[in-house]
Image (cartoon, grey):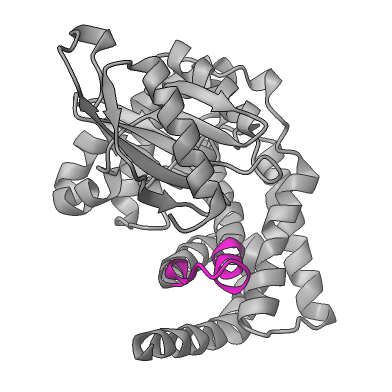
């Protein structure tokens, strides 16, 4: 074991797994599954049977997920509460089998390792709809089943704080680009515009990170949803644009528009406010919400590299920049931002990312 918390987690998870499954024989070690973009770490605890096994829901699984989720930085109570609500709504969230809030340990149902992302890449544009439609089903159930009023509001200060990660960590931190007074005026004006646009949209429960690495293809054929503990009450397009303008895979704009329209038609059938808003406004909502998210993501991916020594996300920044520019160019309100980005940001970003990639290949 590499550290004290891992050893403590193993002891706790072993004890709790035996409470749940008395005939289990837990492994003597935890296997690393992943860390994510937060301070959580996930481990797999393999279970071997030691006797006759019951059938059905009480059957012993072959493994469980042990989570190291430090209470000083992670909201574990929110995770447990939202998981319970999602399951009640018919969304396949992992069952929470045990939790120790004081230590920041959780024991979860194991969803396996089959993320939606590789399946989408293998399926290609023609096969993608068959994979996205179950994700639409789950998102509709999430928006209907989570109590939005119990979630924190994704209000203007939070929207602005997220987007300012772009100037702090991407421009200032990664690119060493200092904004002059005019550039700061332009950028702040766009951030204000995008925040206001998000707040005028119909509000509902928002997963906040609904994309192909947080959707799992389960052994029983269903779609599992993970990493939902940061859910908020926010814009109805936020999760959809996270899914279809995914930071880890891209599709032609025509396909994204066709798929998003199918979702819109289903969602408009359940909401008078969305129906009355109309499809043309939905397309604008979808685009502008994506711009907000992609500014934030450029900042977060830069921060993960600079602060947390998680540099793999740098490879995804070029796609995020392309998303931002290709959509921003469609809106006259963003002309000054596009000109500044093209002239001041993009050349420096390309050069810096190439240099970092070259450095990484030599080490």
Q: Which residues are magenta?
A: 300-314
Q: Residue at point 51% right, 31% down?
A: 106
Vertical placement of residue 220 versus 118, above or below: above
Looking at the rendering, in which quadrant would you find the C terminus?
Answer: bottom left
Percent across and percent down for residue 94 are 40, 26
Q: Quadrant of residue 240?
A: top left
Vertical placement of residue 283 versus 304, above or below: above
| Residue 141 visible within the image | yes
Vertical placement of residue 185 versus 287, above or below: below
Q: Residue at point 67% right, 85% down?
A: 176
Percent across and percent down for residue 104 are 61, 37
* 67, 10: nearer the viewer: 10
Percent across and percent down for residue 321 are 49, 69
| Residue 139 visible within the image | no
- Mainly helix, strand or loop, the magenta region? helix
Q: Residue at point 23% right, 48% down?
A: 120
Looking at the rendering, in which quadrant would you find the N terminus?
Answer: bottom left
Q: Residue at point 23% right, 37% down?
A: 131
Residue ranking furthest to the right: 181
Disc tally is: 0
Q: Does the magenta segment cover residue 65?
A: no
Percent across and percent down for residue 288 are 58, 50
Q: Quadrant of residue 187?
A: bottom right
Is 351 placed left or right of 78 in the picture?
left
* 231, 246: nearer the viewer: 231
């Amino acid at each position: 074991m590499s550290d004290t918390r891992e050893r403590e987690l193993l002891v706790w998870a072993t004890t709790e797994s035996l409470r749940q499954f008395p005939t289990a024989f837990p492994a003597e070690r935890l296997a690393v599954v992943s860390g994510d973009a937060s301070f959580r770490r996930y481990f797999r605890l393999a279970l071997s049977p030691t006797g006759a096994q019951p059938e059905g829901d009480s059957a012993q699984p072959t493994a469980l997920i042990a989570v190291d989720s430090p209470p000083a930085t992670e909201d574990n109570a929110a995770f447990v509460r939202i998981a319970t609500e999602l399951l009640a709504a018919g969304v396949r969230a992992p069952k929470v089998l045990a939790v120790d809030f004081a230590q920041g340990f959780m024991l979860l149902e194991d969803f396996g390792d089959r993320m939606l992302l590789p399946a989408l890449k293998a399926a290609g544009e023609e096969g993608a709809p068959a994979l996205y439609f179950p994700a639409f089903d789950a998102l509709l159930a999430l928006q209907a089943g989570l109590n939005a009023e119990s979630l924190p509001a994704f209000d203007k200060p939070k929207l602005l704080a997220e987007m300012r990660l772009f100037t702090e960590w991407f421009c200032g931190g990664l690119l060493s680009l200092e904004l002059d007074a005019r550039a700061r005026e332009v950028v702040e004006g766009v951030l204000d515009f995008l925040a206001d646009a998000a707040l005028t949209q119909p509000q509902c429960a928002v997963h906040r990170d609904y994309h192909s690495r947080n959707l799992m293809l389960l052994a029983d054929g269903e779609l599992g949803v993970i990493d939902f503990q940061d859910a908020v009450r926010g814009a109805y397009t936020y999760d959809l644009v996270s899914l279809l303008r995914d930071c880890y895979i891209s599709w032609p704009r025509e396909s994204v528009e066709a798929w998003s329209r199918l979702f819109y038609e289903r969602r408009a059938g359940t909401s008078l406010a969305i129906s009355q808003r109309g499809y043309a406004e939905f397309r604008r909502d979808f685009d502008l919400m994506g711009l907000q998210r992609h500014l934030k993501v450029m900042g977060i991916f830069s921060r993960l590299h600079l602060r947390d020594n998680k540099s793999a996300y740098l490879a995804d920044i070029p796609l995020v920049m392309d998303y931002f520019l290709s959509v921003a160019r469609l809106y006259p309100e963003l002309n000054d931002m596009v000109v500044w980005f093209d002239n001041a940001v993009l050349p420096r970003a390309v050069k810096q990312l190439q240099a970092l990639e070259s450095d990484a290949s030599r080490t």
